Structures are given as C-alpha cells and as structure tokens.
Image (cartoon, grey):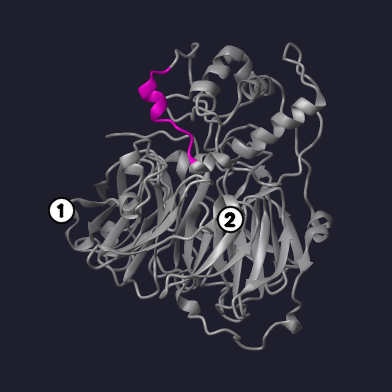
Amino acid sequence: MKTFLRASAFGMGLAIAFSGAVAVADEPSSEKLKTHETTPGGQYQPSLDLPAGQPGAKPGAPVLTAEQFTQANRIYFERCAGCHGVLRKGATGKPLTTDITTELGGEYIKAFITYGSPAGMPNWGTSGDLSEAEIELMTAYLLNDPATPPEWGMKEMEGTWKIVVPVDKRPKKRANKLDLDNLFSVTLRDAGQIALIDGESKKIVSVIDTGYAVHISRVSASGRYLYVIGRDARINLIDLYMDPPQTVAEIKVGLEARSVETSKFKGWEDKYAIAGSYWPPQYVIMDGDTLKPQKVVSTRGMTVDTQEYHPEPRVAAIVASHYRPEFIVNVKETGNVLMVDYSDLNNLKVTTIGAERFLHDGGFDSTGRYFLVAANARNTIAVVDTKEDKLTALIKTGATPHPGRGANFVHPKFGPVWATSHLGDETIALIGTDPAKHKDSAWKVVQSLEGQGGGSLFIKTHPKSTNLWVDTPLNPEAEISSSVVVFDIKNLDKGYEVIPIGELSGISEGVRRVVQGEYNKAGTEVWFSVWNGKTQESAIVVIDDRTRKLKAVIKDKRLVTPTGKFNVYNTQHDVY
C-alpha cells in the first residue's frame, strides 16, 4: 500500500517527524525539495491576541527578547498550532515540547525547518516562506517553553459581539429573488471573505467580509440564516432574506476555532447556534438570530484511553441531532463525543460518550441517526447512535481518514454505506451502515477502493447521482493534486476515471490544487475549487455529473483562494 504522510490539513503545520532515535538530517535532494513546496494554506494568518513576552527562558536555551518571543509566538500560532496544539503537546502533528526539541538539538530543528523532509515537512526555508533570520528565531523558540495564550470567556466574547441589523429591522419575509436553495457559500480563504454564488447563472451575488480562512458554512433549519466561522474564531451571521444578503450580527468566540452549528430539532429550529474553539478549549451556545452568547463550557478534562488530564482538548466537528434537542460536540484530544442538551441551558445536561482520541470531522449516515466521525490520528471511524446516545462501533480504516462529511450511497452488494477517503494513503473505505437489513455488513469496512493517491481531504456523492468523487489536494505530485477521480457506484470494481480539473480550468500558473467537490441541489452538477496562491488566479470548475464533462468555469478577480463550497439546500438538510 502506498502511503502519504502530511504536514497538516491545508498546509498548517510545522510537522517535524519526531519518533524514535534521531540524527542530523542530510540535505534533501532537489527532487525531494520540489515535492514539498509550501502549499497556499501555509499562508495561514489569523488574527490572534497573543501574550507579549517570554514566560521565562529555559535554562541552557537561547535567550529571546520580549520582542523576539512575540514574533516567534505569532509565527507558531499562524502556521503550526493548528496541528501541534497551542501548548505544543501535539495532536495530529507530533509534540514539540522542550524535552523532545532539546534532545534533538538546534541544528537538527533548523535543518528540518529549512529543507523539509519526505515525511511531509514543508521546506519553509528553501520555499522562501521563512527567511534565514526567521528560521533561526523559530529554532530558538522551539528550544524554549511555550507561552500560554490568554483565556477568552464571556466578558471577552461580549466585548466583540455586534448587532449590525437588529431583528426588528430585518425583513419579515424574503426581500430578494435569489434561488436560495441553489445558492453556494464559497470560502475565499486568504481574503477573509465568502462569496455567494448563484447556482444557475454561476455569477457572484455578493462578497461578504468574514473572519480569516472560513472553515465551514452552516445553514439554519429554516434556511434563512447562514453561519460562517473563520479560523480566527470570528462568526458572521448572514441573513439570506435581505437584498442583498448581508451580515446582521458577529462575534469572536475565542482565538482559534473551526466549528459552528445551529439547532435543528423540531420546535427548536433557528433557536440556538453553537461554536467550538481550538483555543481556549471550550464551546459556547448563542441565540440563533443574534449570536448573543448564553453559555460557555470548557472541554478540559481526561482522555478517553489513559484517563490523563489534557489541558487543551480542542473542539472539532459539531453537528445537530435530528432525534433530540442536542448538539453533538466532538472533542479532539480527549476523544469524547459530548451530547449537549440545549433544552434547558440553566440546567445543562451533557452525555459524555467515550470514543477514540483525536476526533476530527464526520457526518451522518443516510438515515440521519448515526454519526460517523474520524479519529484520524488513530486511523479509526467512531460511530455514535444519536437516537440512543451510545457508542455503536469503532472501525479501523486506512491511514488518517479525512471524510469531510463523508459520502452516503447504496452499494450493489452491501446495501447502504458511508465512505471516507484518507490523507495518509490512496484508499477509500466503504463502511456498512444498515444494521436492520444488512446486519452482516454493518459497522465494518465492506470494501476498500484504491484511488490515485494519498492527500485526500473530501469525498462526495449525491442521492440522485451514481458517481463517487474523490479529491487529492495535498498529494505532493502536482498532476495528482490538480485532478480528481470518479468511480461508478454501480460498477466500483471497474476502477476510477481521472478528471484533470486544473487543466480544464484553463489556469496555467501555480500548483492548482483541486479541493472539495460540492453538488448543486438537483445533484446534476459537481463544483470543484482550483485553489492557487493569494496572488495567483484561482477558479471554480463545474462538471456535469452525468457526462463527467466540463460544464462551466467560474473566474472572477474576487475569487481569491477559493476552498470550501457549501450549497445552501444540501447543507441545510445534511445531504451528502
């Protein structure tokens, strides 16, 4: 089996591969350097409020001035903390604590930062992303103890909360003529914006300023409100009924974040929103129509396996249950899935389900009852029954599963399945999800398909489609990262067809990483982002799902580093 080891999702990570005995690295060959060019995602630059000084020089470590420490701290938070943790204790990436870095030594660390490695370390120095002086600074920084960033509680949240348009000043009914069901919310990553694109005309309806590098867009149960959250923990509440749609409220829920969701259970539609933070490790429940914060809850606690205290268990994916008035909150480092009952915030009830450590992303099965989430650093998919609030299964898959929401379809032999692709190898795992009619196939990998390579972030299909699409944007080979593959669900053994999305875009410059297929409401088109650097041309390529042929290329100067795309109807109704 071919494997692909990554630095971190979307290029964020100083992924020094620390394991076992070490030696000073030899200078990699030019060919190796070529395959580890820094991705556009390496330009991760969120707005972070960081401590200004050094917590105290570690004995024997290089001494940094307060100014130098602040500069190094910012570089680390912007490029590395997403994988290695704010406190450098590791998560998807390896720990970078001083007991490890001191043993390795400065020359070893400097070599890895400068040249990268075949194991997935970006070549920060030879790519020009970090200067020689910055590399020296980061080497010294990693030999010193990390600073602890400030907490961010109710007082700080309320200080950032803004009502841009009060509820009583918003339209009583839809004021525009947009086809909201077929509207796409598109992340313009490095611009700190989203673009709303009409699914029929393929034209940009509006560009809205948001937090930096929006991670996801979520739609309220009614379809009226769009919630987007940046990696800098800023949430924008956008009223899709306004003409044009615009931000009506915003809040900053922490210093770094990934997830937002809205209540969907019958009788609670649009009532609440919830967001989870990477730092501080906590979640906050807010009013759904204003984002006024109501309840902040810490996730610090014991790990599910060793029962050791973890100071930084970050909140990964959050989804809304269709069976109870509950939010399903996944806590990455502890491996706990929290079923948060929002029916009484004053007497908050939380059911804790021990799953597996390093929970990341996932989605529902086709019935909406079972939630499947990747514990990616443990090569495992955890299955939670949201009707019974119990762990159903832990399923071993390939290396580092990264499903996004996953893909549901009916397998010709095994019945309903949910699929995930992988960052660490080329396989696609198909997991049986029907314990009633296909008991022998339920909660196991019933088939493993071979794709074109590792480095996949998203897999996608649609209930009206017979195609299964798999991207590979983090593969080190340019030809693979700029294309996708598609399988015929009715004949999976036939293998895949390669679709050269980057070439079809007509863009000749850059790496042209192709990421995240997303269907229109009808399931007749699938949209892919061609993700280039901030100063390079990017595009969205639309493929006819039936013929697998090019249907349209969306280009616009405002499409700066497009990544995630979220069709309003599909996102609202958990169609994937």
Magenta-span inclusion, residue 1: no
Residue 1 placed where, x, y %?
A: 27, 34
> How busy is the neighbourhood of tag 2: few (under 14 within 10 Å), some, or many (20 plus)?
many
Query: Residue at image x 48%, y 54%?
Result: 563
> How busy is the neighbourhood of tag 1: few (under 14 within 10 Å), some, or many (20 plus)?
few
Quadrant where the C terminus is found in the figure: bottom left
Which residue is situated farthest in the bottom direction here?
Answer: 172
Q: Identify which residue, 182 or 309, lies in the foreground.
A: 182
Q: State the residue position of label 1.
A: 494
| Residue type, label 1 | Lys
Query: Residue at image x 64%, y 59%?
Result: 210
Residue 82 placed where, x, y %?
A: 59, 41
Nearer to us: label 2 or label 1: 2
| Residue type, label 2 | Val
Whether residue 54 can be seen here? no
Residue 506 placed where, x, y %?
A: 34, 53
Q: Which of marks 2 and 1 is nearer the N terminus?
A: 2
Is 237 left, or right, of 149 in this rendering? Answer: left
Query: Distance of mark 2 from mark 1, alpha carbons?
Result: 37 Å
Whether residue 542 can be seen here? yes
Task: State whether residue 244 is above or below residue 234.
Answer: below
Residue 142 placed where, x, y %?
A: 65, 23
Q: On the image, which quarter does residue 312 sit in?
A: top right
Magenta-span inclusion, residue 30: yes
Q: State the residue position of label 2.
A: 214
Query: Start and end of the magenta stretch?
Result: 28-39
